[in-house]
Image: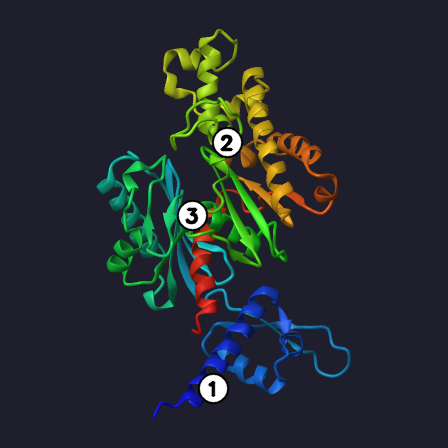
């Protein structure tokens, strides 16, 4: 006979543990009394769960709260060293790896160039080596890890753990990266689109803390977005939501790497800005970039253009302003359709050239339906270049907190 009563009791106990640990992670430092009041669990239940979590080194005492009479109540917080994850963030040009502690802080991190984006075997080797290197550098025992989070440009299938057909990294098309990493390292591996994990990291640790529904836009070499509804990544049906970079913004625009024409990425991304710089220089427009380009075309990349814009080079400034205008129009469309609590904008264009954010905001807000933009915030990323790798690591923490550990 199956003991369903015993199973139900264990399930409820695990659920309560999850609730308490997640609440302390979100709200700590916090007292037992506050946890009991906010979770609606009995103080006795809270006492028992807290004792267990302290014994397991998942939470710790973190000082004392102000007393309203009598003994000062003890504050509880998660133990940063109680749990770790590995975060891997892959872009079209680089791979970032970090070990993330329970508070979401990188303990050790590394970055390397990706190499030929069409060389399948070399790319897989690069990814495996990045994981091995960061684990070795951390010196942390394997049993303290909740898993590995892997983020890359989409599209990908998070359920099967397979990268599908990323336009800018063709060598990873249909690579079962989850299975490869699980077999190699013996840990649970979660994969997700890069912009989705950036949204998750801003929700947990960054500009969107305390909110429920946000959109993150990654304005970088490419352009992508991630969506959070009710504090969970929204993947769409089945998993392709958030491809803002491949919405048409210019009907007869240039061809995009995805095969369509006039996509936001084709007219406003870092790649598009570099292409436009070459077109303007060949047309004879004067710029400090001209001699570099004429000597060697590939020396004028996005980084060179942003450096020139900081020195107020007219061509570089105008190209970035043109890009910001397109992105601002796209954001206005998003606000009018979805009205999220906040749109957080990150990526190299915003992180390294602050006027870019102000320019896209000036374009976006006047195009929003009047009653919407009053309550929907546009914010720049607070985690900046670390949003992807921290968000990838957060996948493992999120799974741990919801899995009945």
Q: CA distance from mark 2 to mark 3?
A: 21 Å
Q: Foreground mark, 1 or 2? A: 2
Mark 1: few/some/many CA within 10 Å (<14, 14-19, 20+): few
Q: Secondary structure at mark 3?
A: strand
Of the numbered discs 2 and 3, the one sitting upstream in the chain is: 3
- At a point 44% along the width and 49% down the height, the residue shown is 389
In front here: 81 or 308?
308
Is 357 placed above or below 96 here?
Answer: above
Whole-percent x and y of residue 286?
52, 9
Give the numbered dot on residue 193: 3
Q: Are marks 3 and 1 in contact (CB under 8 Å)?
A: no
Whole-percent x and y of residue 70?
74, 83
- At a point 39% along the width and 40% down the height, the residue shown is 91
Whole-percent x and y of residue 361?
65, 34
In front here: 83 or 127?
127
Is 154 placed above or below 234 here?
Answer: above
Q: Are marks 2 and 3 in contact (CB under 8 Å)?
A: no
Q: Are marks 1 and 2 in contact (CB under 8 Å)?
A: no
Residue at the spot of label 1: 9
Q: Secondary structure at mark 2?
A: loop
Instruction: State the image quarter where residue 24 is shown.
Output: bottom right
Of the numbered discs 1 and 2, the one sitting upstream in the chain is: 1
Residue at the spot of label 2: 248
Asked whether residue 304 is in view, the answer is: no
- At a point 42% along the width and 51% down the height, the residue shown is 239
Q: Is residue 32 left or right of residue 275?
A: right
Q: In the rendered image, which quarter contains the N terminus?
A: bottom left
Q: Residue furthest left?
A: 121
């Amino acid at each position: 006979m199956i003991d369903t009563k015993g199973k139900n009791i264990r399930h409820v106990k695990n659920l309560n543990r999850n609730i308490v640990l997640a609440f302390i992670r979100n709200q700590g430092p916090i007292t037992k009394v506050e946890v009991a009041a906010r979770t609606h669990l009995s103080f006795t239940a809270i006492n028992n769960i807290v004792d267990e979590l302290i014994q397991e080194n998942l939470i710790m005492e973190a000082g004392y709260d102000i007393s309203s009479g009598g003994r000062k109540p003890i504050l509880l917080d998660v133990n940063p060293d109680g749990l770790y994850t590995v975060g891997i963030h892959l872009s079209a040009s680089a791979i970032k790896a970090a070990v993330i502690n329970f508070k979401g802080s990188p303990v050790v991190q590394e970055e390397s160039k990706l190499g030929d984006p069409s060389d399948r075997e070399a790319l897989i080797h690069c990814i495996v080596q990045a994981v091995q290197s960061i684990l070795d550098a951390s010196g942390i025992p394997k049993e303290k890890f909740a898993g590995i989070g892997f983020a890359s440009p989409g599209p990908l299938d998070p359920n099967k753990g397979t990268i599908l057909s990323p336009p800018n990294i063709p060598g990873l098309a249909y690579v079962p990266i989850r299975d490869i990493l699980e077999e190699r390292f013996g840990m649970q591996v979660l994969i997700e689109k890069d912009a989705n994990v950036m949204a998750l990291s801003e929700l947990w640790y960054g500009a969107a803390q305390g909110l429920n529904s946000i959109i993150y836009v990654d304005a970088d070499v490419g352009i992508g977005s991630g969506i959070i509804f009710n504090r969970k990544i929204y993947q769409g049906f089945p998993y392709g939501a958030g491809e803002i970079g491949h919405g048409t913004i210019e009907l007869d625009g240039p061809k995009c790497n995805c095969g369509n024409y006039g996509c936001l990425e084709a007219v406003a991304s870092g790649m598009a800005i570099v292409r436009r710089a070459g077109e303007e220089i060949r047309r004879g427009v004067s710029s400090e970039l001209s001699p570099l380009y004429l000597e060697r075309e590939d020396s004028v990349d996005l980084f060179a253009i942003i450096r020139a814009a900081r020195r107020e080079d007219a061509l570089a400034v105008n190209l970035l302003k043109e890009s910001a205008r397109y992105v601002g129009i796209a954001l206005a469309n998003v606000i009018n359709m979805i009205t999220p609590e906040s749109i957080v904008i990150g990526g190299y264009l915003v992180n390294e050239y602050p006027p870019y954010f102000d320019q896209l905001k000036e374009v976006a807000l006047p195009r929003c339906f009047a009653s919407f933009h009053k309550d929907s915030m546009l914010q720049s990323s607070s985690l900046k270049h670390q949003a992807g790798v921290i968000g990838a690591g957060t996948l493992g923490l999120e799974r741990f907190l919801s899995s009945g550990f």
